[in-house]
Image (spheres, rainbow, N blue to C red):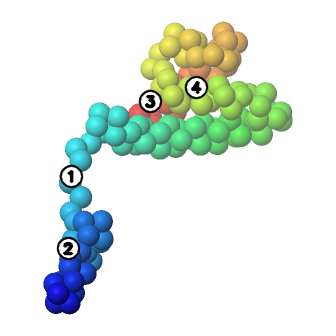
Amino acid sequence: MKLLLHRQLQIRSPLTFDKTKKIKPKAIPKSKAQKQSTTRSESASSTAELVSLLKAWRTLEARSNHCPAFRILRDTTLLDIATARPQSESELLAVPGMGSKLLAKYGKKILTLVTEKS
């Protein structure tokens, strides 16, 4: 009887973890959202590069005009330009923060920067 009890004690319960077995995780295919997030991150980095380029241009313009940089264009306007990537003056005019005076004064320079970066 003791022998039988001894064997019963050595039986593992199904809840114990066996370190010798390696469990392979199943390969989960990427969803559409995950695939799009990689392209979004690439476009986000190019947008950030364009914003920094536009900010550098704005700083040079502000120094040459002896005025603060926010008087040239606001940061939100630069971000909207970098996101929209306008290719024409009408598309640039549709960006929030861009008016006809700003378009006449800086439109060609901005479009040149955007098309060079694209």
Mark 1 or 4 closer to N-term?
1
Indicate the amino acid at tag 3: Thr
Q: Quadrant of residue 108?
A: top right
Mark 2 or 3 closer to N-term?
2
In screen coordinates, is 117 left or right of 80? left
Q: Is residue 36 visible?
A: no
Q: Position of residue 15 (x, y in %)?
A: 30, 65
- The residue lying at 20 percent from left, 90 percent from top is 2
Q: CA distance from mark 2 to mark 3?
A: 57 Å
Q: Which mark is residue 27?
A: 1
Dot 2: what SS?
loop
* Image vertical order of residue 93 relative to residue 27, above or below: above
Q: Which mark is residue 21?
A: 2
Indicate the amino acid at tag 1: Ala
Mark 4 or 3 closer to N-term?
4
Q: Which mark is residue 80?
A: 4
Q: Is residue 11 visible?
A: yes
Mark 2: few/some/many CA within 10 Å (<14, 14-19, 20+): few
- The residue lying at 43 percent from left, 42 percent from top is 41
